[in-house]
Amino acid sequence: MTTKIRIHLADDHQILIDGISSLLQTIPDFEVVGFSLNGSNLFDEVTQNKTDILMLDINMPQKDGIAVIKEFAEKGFPCKVIILSSYDDLKLIKEIMKLGASGYLTKQCAGENIVEAIEAVYRGEEYFCEAVREKIFNNVTKDNPKLNKIDSALNSILTGREIEIITLISLEYSGKEISEQLYISINTVETHRKNIMKKLDLKNSIGLVKYAIKNNLVKS
């Protein structure tokens, strides 16, 4: 990567900002270009420092994270936004992603996922940490009698997200329905579908369904 990813950190705890900043500065392709202890003036700050990724807490003084994202949505997003929060409430996550955030990490998993999240969002993907993904997926499929328990460790070829996508395709969810249920864009769904087909050397959706049944992702 020739251009560094420019990152702005917004959280009301200086100790957390310092810790994340120290971690990110060990990555050659990352540059922390600013930080904020409250949500006021964030739009102007990230615009002025040409931020690529804003790591944003929800609970902040003066203007909380939801208000910040609403302002971004109204004015036009000056950068991509990844939420870094203690909350994992599905209603809240859904609201935030609909407003236009590109990722969601809980603070409990941030240390092990933050680099991966930034790189994925910078590439134009949406990103959820594993704990949030599992909560979303379990909520989607909890009442579906065709679904077996998913264990991404059983499959070394597909990622956890790809297993979720192939499972929902096999359950006859449309691209739009998958997008709505997993809080990702239709373009992201299609990208995952193409990657799955390429990895598994499949030619059509029938092949995807057969693969899912064969590998016990769904009951036949």
Image (cartoon, grey):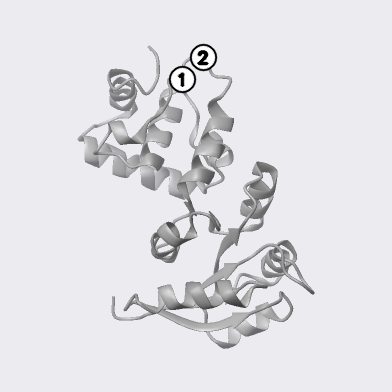
Q: In this view of the protein, can residue 52 be seen by the observer?
A: no
Q: Which mark is residue 147?
A: 1
- Give the residue displayed 44% in from the left and 43% down from the top: 189
- x%, y% of residue 187? 46, 49
The residue pinned by badge 2 equals: 145
- x%, y% of residue 12? 67, 73
Q: Is residue 175 left or right of residue 1?
A: right
The reply to whether dot 2 and dot 1 touch (C-beta < 8 Å) is yes
Where residue 68 sits, quadrant-wise, is: bottom right
Q: Residue furthest right?
A: 62
- Give the residue displayed 54% in from the left and 19% down from the top: 144
Q: Measure the alpha-carbon separation of dots 2 and 1.
A: 6 Å
Disc 1 residue type (three-letter): Leu
- Give the residue displayed 64% in from the left and 73% down from the top: 13
Disc 2 residue type (three-letter): Pro
- x%, y% of residue 26? 35, 77
Q: Residue furthest top?
A: 220
- x%, y% of residue 54? 55, 71
